[in-house]
Image: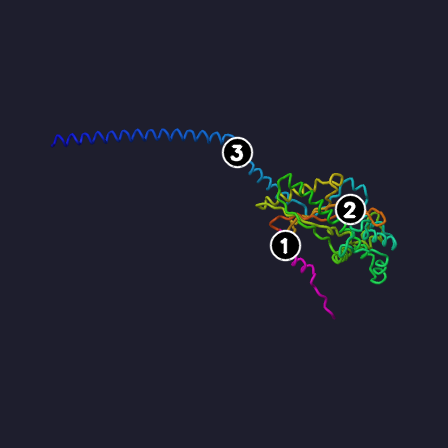
């Protein structure tokens, strides 16, 4: 029995040893297989990654470069002067524009206004602005503040006793509306060029912004007269200047662009790139010339509620208006473009009521 038991134990031990050997061989085979698969996988990964090797380092360098560019843009924005008028050197051959540069005060007299010297010439210039050769191009409503007949002109002068200041202002409102859409389309083209060249994100108005209305023009005309009464300008008579303070108002056509970005530095970079595009424009190449720049970010400037933007006053050549009698009136005007950082856009949308209250739009005079 003892011998049989020993034999059985030996047989069992040999069986277990055999199983262990088989298991070891299986494990080694599996490990060899896995090692082979891992090697193949590594070779595949290396083949895929080869074209992109070092890309992470390049991307870091790009991000760092963009960050530096944004920082430079922020510094340039802060270094901008509060308000500066810059007239092209060749324009200053004209004594009027040289005077504008010296005074650092901008005004612009449309060609039609300089043709007015008496009541008859005033009537014809108003009529030409109000009655185009193409009846379908006629302005209506608030856009047309001039006259369409001698009876209308007589009513303004003899019944309503409209002063020459008002007639010039009426002509200016109509003229601004003739220029308005073309001005905004041209500004959009220039901003779109900067956007596409530099991959910017810029918010543009979906619909044309309305030109300033007569009532507001007349209010600001009074303010301009209080501030600049008696100023002389080359090639403009004292009598003419006494009635034309409305031509100090240079935002009758205006629009704004939103400078977007995930961070404030990115928004500033967008703003400065668009500004640079306008600075590079000329009348010869673009029909546009930047004449005045105002920065709400300059040292010492404190906007209402902390609001700030960059305002540009741009001269634009927009073609011509053909009047009923075939007279061609050049459409050239100075308008305003605002560059607004995305973070300030939300503030501006809620500031209009505050602005109206601050300027006294809701004030009522007390009766004595």
- Per the model, the C-alpha gap separating discs 2 and 1 is 30 Å
Q: Determine the residue positioned at 73% across, 69% down.
A: 367
- Return the mark for residue 332: 2
In the image, taking residue 55 as reference, residue 27 lies left or right, namely left
**Which secondary structure, mark 2?**
strand
- Residue at far left of view: 1
Residue 324 forms part of the magenta stretch? no
Answer above or below: position of 38 versus 103.
above
For image coordinates 71% across by 53% down, the residue present is 210
Q: 39 or 264: which is nearer to us?
A: 39
Which label's residue is closer to the chain start, 2 or 1?
A: 2
Residue 6, label in figure: none
Q: Which of 44 and 64 is in front in this view?
A: 44
Give left or right: position of 50 versus 196: left
- Cα separation between marks 3 and 1: 43 Å
Looking at the rendered structure, the secondary structure element under dot 3 is helix
What percent of the width, then of the height, locates residue 4?
13, 31
Q: Quadrant of residue 157?
A: bottom right
The crowding category of the residue bearing disc 1, from other C-alpha atoms within 10 Å (few below 14, some 14 to 19, many at least 20), is: few
The label on residue 55 is: 3
Residue 349: assigned label: 1
Residue 366 forms part of the magenta stretch: yes
Is 193 in front, or is 226? 193
> Which residues lie in the magenta part?
345-368
| Mark 3 surroundings within 10 Å by alpha-carbon count, few (fewer than 14), some (14 through 19), many (20 or more) | few
Examine the image and state in which quarter residue 220 appears. bottom right
List x then y, in percent, for residue 153. Answer: 84, 58
Position of the C terminus by quadrant: bottom right
């Amino acid at each position: 029995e003892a011998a049989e038991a020993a034999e059985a134990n030996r047989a069992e031990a040999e069986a277990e040893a055999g199983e262990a050997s088989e298991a070891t061989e299986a494990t080694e085979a599996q490990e060899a297989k896995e090692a082979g698969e891992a090697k193949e996988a590594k070779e595949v990964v290396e083949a895929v990654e080869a074209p992109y090797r070092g890309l992470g380092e390049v991307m870091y360098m790009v991000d760092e470069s963009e960050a530096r560019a944004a920082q430079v843009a922020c510094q340039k924005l802060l270094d901008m002067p509060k308000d500066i008028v810059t007239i092209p050197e060749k324009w200053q051959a004209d004594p009027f524009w040289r005077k504008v540069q010296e005074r650092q005060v901008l005004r612009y007299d449309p060609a039609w206004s300089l043709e007015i010297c008496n009541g008859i010439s005033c009537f014809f210039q108003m009529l030409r602005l109000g009655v185009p050769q193409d009846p379908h191009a006629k302005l209506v409503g608030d856009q047309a503040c001039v006259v369409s007949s001698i009876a209308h002109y007589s009513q303004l002068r003899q019944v309503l006793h409209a002063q020459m200041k008002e007639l010039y202002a009426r002509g200016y409102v109509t003229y601004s509306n003739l220029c308005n859409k073309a001005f905004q389309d041209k500004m959009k083209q220039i901003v779109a060029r900067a956007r596409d060249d530099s991959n910017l994100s810029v918010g543009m108005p979906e619909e044309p912004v309305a030109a300033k209305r007569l009532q507001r023009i007349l209010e600001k005309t009074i303010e301009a007269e209080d501030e600049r009464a008696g100023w002389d300008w080359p090639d403009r008579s004292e009598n003419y200047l006494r009635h034309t303070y409305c031509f100090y108002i240079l935002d009758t056509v205006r629009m704004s662009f939103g400078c977007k970005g995930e961070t404030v530095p990115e928004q500033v970079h967008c703003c400065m790139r668009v500004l640079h595009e306008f600075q590079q424009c000329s009348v010869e190449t673009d029909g546009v010339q930047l004449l005045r720049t105002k920065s709400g970010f300059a040292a010492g400037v404190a906007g209402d509620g902390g609001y700030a933007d960059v305002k540009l006053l741009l001269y634009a050549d927009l073609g011509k208006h053909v009047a009923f009698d075939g007279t061609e009136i050049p459409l050239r005007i100075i308008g305003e473009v605002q560059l607004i950082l995305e973070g300030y856009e939300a503030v501006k949308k809620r500031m209009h009521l505050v602005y109206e209250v601050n300027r006294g739009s809701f004030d009522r005079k007390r009766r004595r």
